[in-house]
Structure formats: C-alpha cells, structure tokens
Amino acid sequence: MNKFIFVSGGVCSSLGKGVAASSLGALLEGRGLNVRMVKCDPYINVDAGTMSPYQHGEVYVTDDGAETDLDLGNYARFTSGPLSRANSITTGQIYDAVIRKEREGRYLGRTIQVIPHITDEIKGRILAIAKESPDNDVVIVEIGGTVGDIESIPFLEAARQMIHEMGRNNAISVHLTLIPEVAGAELKTKPTQHSVKAMQELGIQPDVLICRAPVMLEEATLRKIALFTNVETEAVIVSYDIDTTIYQVPLMFYEQKLDQIVLKKMGVEIRHADLSAWYAMMDKFNARQGRARIGIVGKYMELHDAYKSVYEAIFHAGLSCGVVTELVKVDSARLEAASDPDAVLGSGGSSPVDGVLVPGGFGDRGIGGMVRAASWARTHGVPYFGICLGMQVMVIEWARNVLRWEDADSTEFTHGTAHPVISLLEDQVDVQMMGGTMRLGNSETRACEGTLIHNAYGNPVIHERHRHRYEFSNKYRKDILDSGLVLGAFTPDNALVESVEWPGHTWGLGVQFHPEFKSKPTAAHPLFTAFVQAITARLQADTP
C-alpha cells in the first residue's frame, strides 16, 4: 500500500504546515501505519547548509549528513520514520539533476521543459521514498511556500499529476489556510475561499482543509467554508490557538477525527488508535512544578527558529524532569559589551539564570560574550552546557583563564594566534566549496567511564550528528589535560576530542556534536535531561 498526502498552504507563510503535516503523521503512526515525511522547498539553493539562520532558521542535519530545512526537525520530533537527504527536495536539487542529465545526453536531444522533465524529476524522488521499503504505507509530502508563489508551481503541478494518475483513493490534498480575526473579533473566511480557488485554478481540489484560527470555529462557519470550497463539512478541520504546547496539536486533530477522515478518503481500514505516548506527555506537561531559568547565549537570538531544536530539546528535558524550563535569550554581543557578566546573567541583573547553554554557530561576532558566559558559569558553579561552538568556547576560556594563554583562540576567529587551541580539521584545509563539505552526519563517539557524558548516556558508545569544520587542537591536548580540564570522549581511533568537562564543577559539559537533533517530546535526550537535572538539584540545594 502506497498512499500519498500532499500538504500545501495558502494565504500567508508561517501558519504551521510543518507542525500540521507532522501531527497528521503522528496520528497515522498511532493507527499502526508506516509513515514517511518529505519536504519540498521551492528555494533554488541546493540545500539549507549555506543559508543564514536569519534567513531560514536552523539547519537540521540528518544521519547521512544532509543539511536540510528545519521542518525535518518537526518530522523527527513528531514521527518515527527514518529521515535522510532523500526526504528533503529543493528546486536547486531538481534543476541541478535535470541539467546534469541533459548534459549527459540522457534526454536524447529533446527540448527540456518544466513539464514533463522538471515535474517528472519531482515525482520520481517522491516515489523513490515510497519504494525505499515494502513496509512504507503513507508518504506525506509538505510543499513549501504558499499557493500563488511562482516558485511553488512545479511542485504543485507534480502533486496534481500524481493525484490524477493515481486516483483520489491513493493521493489526496490537504490544504492549510488562515481564518483571520479583524476588528470586533470577527472571523473572516474569505482568505480561505480565495486560497482554495487558487488551488482549484491549478487543477487541485483539496480533500481536507485545515484552518488556522484564533479559536475553534462554530458549526455554521464550518458549513460556510465547506460550501464555498467544495470540501465536505466534516473535512474542514480547525487548528486553533492553544496555550499549552505544539505537541498537543496531534490530540487536537484527533478529537476532530482528522486521521479517520484521511484514512476514509484513501480507502484504508481504520485501525485502533494508540496515542498513549502523547497523552502521557501531556500529563507530564500538566504535572510540572518549579521553574528552571536557562540562559541561551548565542549569536542569532532575534529569530526563534535559529535555535529551534535546542529550544525544543530543553523543553523535552523539562517534561522529563517535571519542571518548567524558561528560556532567557542573551545576545552574546550584548554580553561582550557588558561591564560585568553578572549584571546580565546573575543576581545583578533583572533575569538571573540557573543554567547557561551556548549553542552552535559560525563566525567571530559575539564570541567574546560566549567566552565571558562560560567563565561566569565556571567560576560561579552554574551548570553549563556547550554544544559544538559552545564546547570550543569552553576550551578557549579554559586556556585563557586557567592556563593564562591570553591570546588562546580558534583559527576560525584569529588565524595568527600563538595558541590555536581550536583549529581547522585536517581534511578541511584545502576545501573551497562551502556547501555540504563540513564534517556532517552521524559519527561514533567513545565516552570515558566516570565522566558526566558517560553517566548521562549510561553507555560508552555514542552515536550523534556533527556539523562543523573546527576541532579541539591535539597540539595542546597534553597541556590542557595536565591543567585539569577533563577530556570526556573521543572518536573511536582517539584522534579527535569530542567532549570536555570542568573538574569539580556542579555540571560543566561541552560536546562537539549536536544532540538536540535526536530529542523528542516523548523521549528527551539524555544530555539535556542531565543538564536540567543538575540545574534543579542546585536549586533544591539552595532552597532553605
């Protein structure tokens, strides 16, 4: 059984197509189906790897080293199907593949056109996902952008062709639109009507509508929408604003029978739904007590999506530990300019934090602020978690303030430093092309017994994903070890340092990889859980 669901959006962007598609995937998995998720991004970039976080949010990395759109992070958190570079399709990839085939003469001299060559390439990639395993039941394809965008038209045309060729029992359209609220709290359905009309003009009749609205819509409004869009009233689903968590969205859709409606339209037997993990997660959400304030000291604080997976992993750890985790976003450039870090992070400021996390990033802007944050956390006994760049910052801070190498730095920031404690990987020295050339994807790490990282995982063998060009410099391994910094994990051949820890500290740990990519609301990542546990233990110790 191969069924296809195409999820599109209208009216405006950022309505939550990714969450809606992921929630539908979670519901179908709850019905016992094997679901695969695909994201079609209309940008001409080959992937998201070279894009600024300010432009497109975080880059989500898969096990096979693909640098993808952040929506794949949603897929990973809501569903259990494997994700790889094949699950991320961009316009850049499609045109690059078609042009390469044309140059190789594989089109036998034909004129290359959007239809059929571009749309055939899109369809071929979607079908390949379905055929990866005979156990795959449903492929959910999220089409980026909004209907009417010129960039999205080839993907929507490919969807139209698949729905036509396979029949509506095998391929359906789910369209997400906006129901805005105007003055006087009046809800307007006209934008949704126009959005569906735009889909119909492209030859696609939506089978299901998901309406983003501030509140649940009344039955009369649902009937009106159905009448003007040729969608059955029962198939008009409302994604209304909630004051809990996005992880309640699958349960919201379940109450409106979205999964049953979709399965019925695709002619699939409706099996018993097992959503016990989602209900248990919401029970944990409602049972949380106490509060842990975690300072995120980073470079891209203005855009929430820039550190999306980190924020979500912290939330998951809070659920696991039974505590509300409050994010305190600190721009590292602001901390760099502050006269006293305690005035920003500690009791001298308006938002004192209970823990500090420094996430990944590139470039030298704000690095001084991150180093100051690490120094403050180390000397004040505040739990600290460094991820990728955050680990490198720990090493730089230690070298400067413990070893007294005042010029210690990374060659990424100061090429001519006399003490390059962080340096470029050897296999990166002659790399000229920037896209997809870093150390990327899943790698094995070996943790040393008795270390924080070993205690967190409970296993010496660790598999996590990397995305970086710079590493701990082995030239200084002995000096740094002799000074007391704990080197807690290495690559299996002992060639690269993968984790460092502060000795005699409440909890100070840095890792070169990105654990945030593997955290789920129903299965918090062990490192984030250990971090939050250390924070709550310190808070409890300080409470009279």
Image: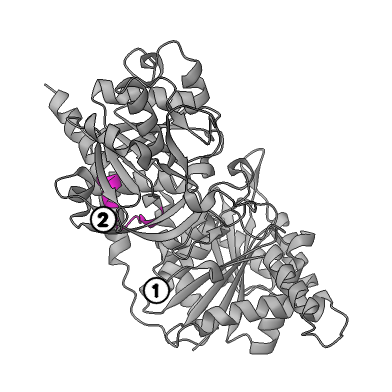
* CB within 8 Å, label 2 to label 1: no
Which x, y percent locates residue 211? 59, 59
The local secondary structure at tag 1 comes to helix
Which x, y percent locates residue 462? 28, 58
The local secondary structure at tag 2 comes to strand
Is 94 placed above or below 445 here? below
The Cα–Cα distance between marks 2 and 1, rounded to whole angstroms, is 33 Å
- Label 1, residues with CA under 10 Å away: few <14, some 14-19, many ≥20: many
Question: Is 503 placed left or right of 219 in the picture?
Answer: left
Q: How is the image coloured?
A: one colour
Which residue occupies the foreground of this view, 429 or 181? Answer: 429
Q: Which residue is mark 1?
A: 29
Mark 2 or mark 1: name the one nearer the start of the chain.
Answer: 1
Which residue occupies the foreground of this view, 361 or 288? Answer: 361
Viewer-nearest of discs 2 and 1? 2
Marker disc for residue 242: none
Q: How many marks?
A: 2
Taking the magenta stretch, the answer to whether it contains residue 82 is: no
Which of the 4 quarters of the picture holds residue 484? top left
Q: Amino acid at mark 1?
A: Glu
Which residue occupies the foreground of this view, 239 or 163? Answer: 163
Q: Which residue is mark 2?
A: 446
State which region is magenta: 517-529
Is 493 placed above or below 378 here? below
Question: Is 28 placed left or right of 147 in the picture?
Answer: left
Q: Residue at x 28, y 32 (%)?
A: 479
Q: Amino acid at mark 2?
A: Arg
Q: Residue at x 49, y 61 (%)?
A: 65
- In which quadrant is the C terminus drawn? top left
Q: Is residue 134 visible?
A: yes
